[in-house]
Amino acid sequence: MHPVVFFTSAALIIGFVIFSVFFNEMVGGIFNPLLNGISTNAGWFFTLCVNVILIFVVYIMFSRYGEIRLGGDDAEPDFTTKSWFAILFSAGMGIGLLFYGVAEPMFHFTNPPIPVENQTEAAHQAMAFTFMYWGPSFLGNLCTNCFGFSFSFL
């Protein structure tokens, strides 16, 4: 750990959070138009990036890089593949699937992100957003973070 980097970052983040709590109307007045502008004008770029990352992860999985053993050639895993899957699934996805698996589609159904004409369209849109947030695109982005962490500890 680099103390200067850590404490500077921590102070800036904590300061921003405290400022946002006490001046939330002002901060909301700044960030809401910014969010709407980015969503309206650059939503396509976000979707493009997510799909490129997903394609990259699938490429890595089936290329020679997917065969790299973490820990070296003689390393033995601490857990079986089935145990690792259970650990990662329950830790990373457990709360998301149990809570948000129902709550998020219902939220998007009652408050459609894009205005729709009828309930059928709202239901389709709600499920589309939920699949986007919790489907392969989410897992692909999660994998890119895992790549960085795993190779930083080699």
Image: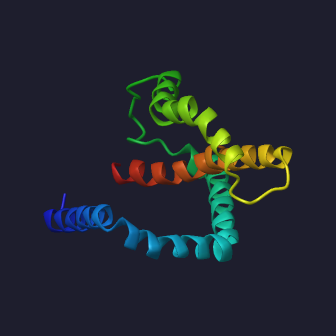
Query: Which residue is at a point 49% across and 32% down the rendered structure image?
Result: 95
Q: Residue 13: name its quadrant.
A: bottom left
Q: Is residue 142 visible?
A: yes
Query: Which residue is at a point 42% across and 39% down the rendered structure image?
Result: 73
- Which of the image's four quarters has the N terminus? bottom left
Q: Position of residue 99 (x, y in %)?
A: 54, 32
Query: Which residue is at a point 31% across and 61% down the rendered structure image?
Result: 21
Q: Position of residue 24 (x, y in %)?
A: 36, 65
User: In this rendering, would 19 be left or right of 133?
Assistant: left
Between residue 139 and residue 104, name the one nearer to us: 104
Q: Is residue 136 above or below residue 12?
A: above
User: In this rendering, would 117 be left or right of 101?
Assistant: right
Q: Is residue 10 above or below residue 106?
A: below
User: In this rendering, would 46 be left or right of 119?
Assistant: left
Q: Position of residue 147 (x, y in %)?
A: 47, 51
Q: Is residue 74 above or below residue 154?
A: above
Q: Position of residue 50 (x, y in %)?
A: 64, 60
Q: What is the basis of the colouring in this image? A: rainbow
Q: Residue 101: name its quadrant.
A: top right
Query: Which residue is at a point 38% across and 41% down the rendered structure image?
Result: 71
Q: Is residue 62 visible?
A: no
Q: Is residue 50 above or below residue 44?
A: above
